[in-house]
């Protein structure tokens, strides 16, 4: 059974950078779109970025546009989230997700990785 496994979270200083990874493991992986979401304490989960698994354009939440970058590596069934110039409001648990079918919901989720922005 395919699983998504995130890594790369931790403590980072304001203005610093961190890169998150999400690898699909455990079987044949099929996806239309991969994405990153986050959930801060006391808040609902929110969209951060998404990338088509084959071809197409990426999309970002306004709050991270110009600071975060999503990318993919097909040979490793992995996506990344490069987070630059981080702010305290970026503190959250970050989840990666996969949409298996076009027009459907994100139906496969990772367990999440904590990113804490603090000096």
Image (spheres, grey):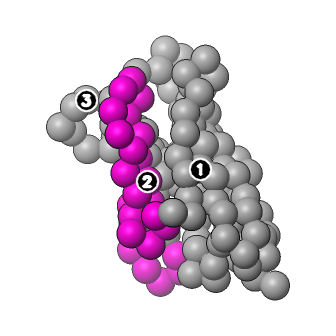
The alpha-carbon separation of the residues under discs 3 and 2 comes to 18 Å
From what the image shows, is residue 64 above or below residue 14? Answer: above
Q: Nearer the viewer, residue 101 or 53?
A: 53
Magenta segment, which residues?
Answer: 40-65
Mark 1 nearby-residue class (10 Å; few <14, some 14–19, many ≥20): many
- Whether the residues at callouts 2 and 1 have beta carbons within 8 Å, the answer is yes
How many numbered marks, from 0 up? 3
The answer to which image quadrant residue 118 occupies is bottom right
From what the image shows, is residue 74 above or below residue 36? Answer: above
Residue 14: x and y in percent read: 73, 79
Q: Which residue is mark 1?
A: 81
- Whether the residues at callouts 3 and 1 have beta carbons within 8 Å, the answer is no
Q: Nearer the viewer, residue 50 or 42?
A: 50
Q: Quadrant of the C terminus?
A: bottom right
View extreme (left): residue: 103
Q: Is residue 38 visible?
A: no
Magenta stretch encompasses residue 70: no
| Label 1 residue SS | strand
Q: Which residue is mark 3?
A: 101
Specify which label sits upstream in the sequence, 3 or 2.
Answer: 2
Specify which label sits upstream in the sequence, 3 or 1.
Answer: 1
| Label 2 residue SS | strand
Q: Nearer the viewer, residue 86 or 37?
A: 86
Q: Main secondary structure of the magenta part?
A: loop
Residue 90: x and y in percent read: 58, 74
The alpha-carbon separation of the residues under discs 3 and 1 comes to 22 Å
- Left or right of 73, for residue 115: right
């Amino acid at each position: 059974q395919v699983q998504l496994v995130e890594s790369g979270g931790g403590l980072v200083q304001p203005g610093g950078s961190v890169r998150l990874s999400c690898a699909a493991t455990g079987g044949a992986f099929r996806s239309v779109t991969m994405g990153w979401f986050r959930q801060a304490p006391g808040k609902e989960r929110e969209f951060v970025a998404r990338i088509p698994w084959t071809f197409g354009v990426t999309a970002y939440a306004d709050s991270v546009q110009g600071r975060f970058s999503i990318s993919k590596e097909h040979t490793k069934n992995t996506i990344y989230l490069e987070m630059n110039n981080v702010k305290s409001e970026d503190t959250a648990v970050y989840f990666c997700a996969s949409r298996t079918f076009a027009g459907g919901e994100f139906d496969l989720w990772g367990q999440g990785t904590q990113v804490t922005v603090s000096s």
